[in-house]
Amino acid sequence: MIDTIGAMSGLIGGAFMGLLGLYIGNRQAKKNRGLDERFHLIRTKARANSWIVTLITTYILFLLLILKFDISIAAVLGMLLLTQMGSWAFFVFYYEYKH
């Protein structure tokens, strides 16, 4: 029971902190005129490329399923979430440096 309460508080708390950080970051960027066309172009390109990486990861996980690897649903979802968010952050930094 305590594990469930801890997991739920972490899940809800993490989502809340992420949304709060997004809100504060966007508010600060508006003050500094940071939400321009370049910002939106970089985020769009990074999001598109991160979906490609996530698709490749999904195919690899299906391959592991076909090969009878025993992976739990929570591990698969965690890998997909980590892949999506990590590749998105990587591509944002990559395109920020490139442009």
Image (tube, helix red, strand yellow):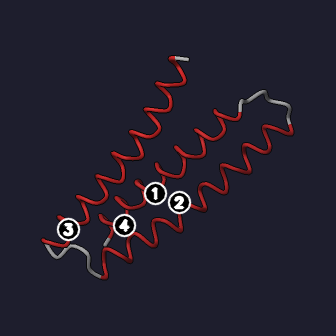
Q: Amino acid at mark 2?
A: Ser
Q: Which residue is mark 1?
A: 88
Q: Residue at x 46, y 57 (%)?
A: 88
The quarter of the rendered structure image containing the N terminus is top right
Q: Quadrant of residue 52?
A: bottom right
User: Label 1: few (<14), some or many (≥20) within 10 Å?
Assistant: many
The quarter of the rendered structure image containing the C terminus is bottom left
Foreground mark, 4 or 3? 3
Secondary structure of residue under mark 1: helix
On the picture, is 98 further left or further right than 90? left
Which labelled disc corresponds to residue 50?
Answer: 2
Callout 2–callout 1 Cβ contact below 8 Å = yes
Q: CA distance from mark 1 to mark 3?
A: 19 Å
Q: Residue at x 48, y 53 (%)?
A: 87
Q: Which residue is mark 4?
A: 95
Q: Quadrant of residue 96?
A: bottom left
Q: Quadrant of residue 44?
A: bottom left
Of the two numbered discs 1 and 3 on the same chain, state the one appearing first in sequence: 3
Q: CA distance from mark 4 to mark 2?
A: 12 Å
Q: Which residue is mark 3?
A: 29
Of the two numbered discs 4 and 3 on the same chain, state the one appearing first in sequence: 3
Q: Amino acid at mark 4?
A: Tyr
Of the two numbered discs 2 and 1 on the same chain, state the one appearing first in sequence: 2
Q: CA distance from mark 2 to mark 1?
A: 5 Å
Give x and y (percent) for residue 3.
52, 19
Q: Residue at x 19, y 73 (%)?
A: 30
Q: Amino acid at mark 1?
A: Trp
Of the two numbered discs 4 and 2 on the same chain, state the one appearing first in sequence: 2
Give x and y (percent) for residue 23.
28, 60
Seen as rendered, the residue at the extreme top is 2
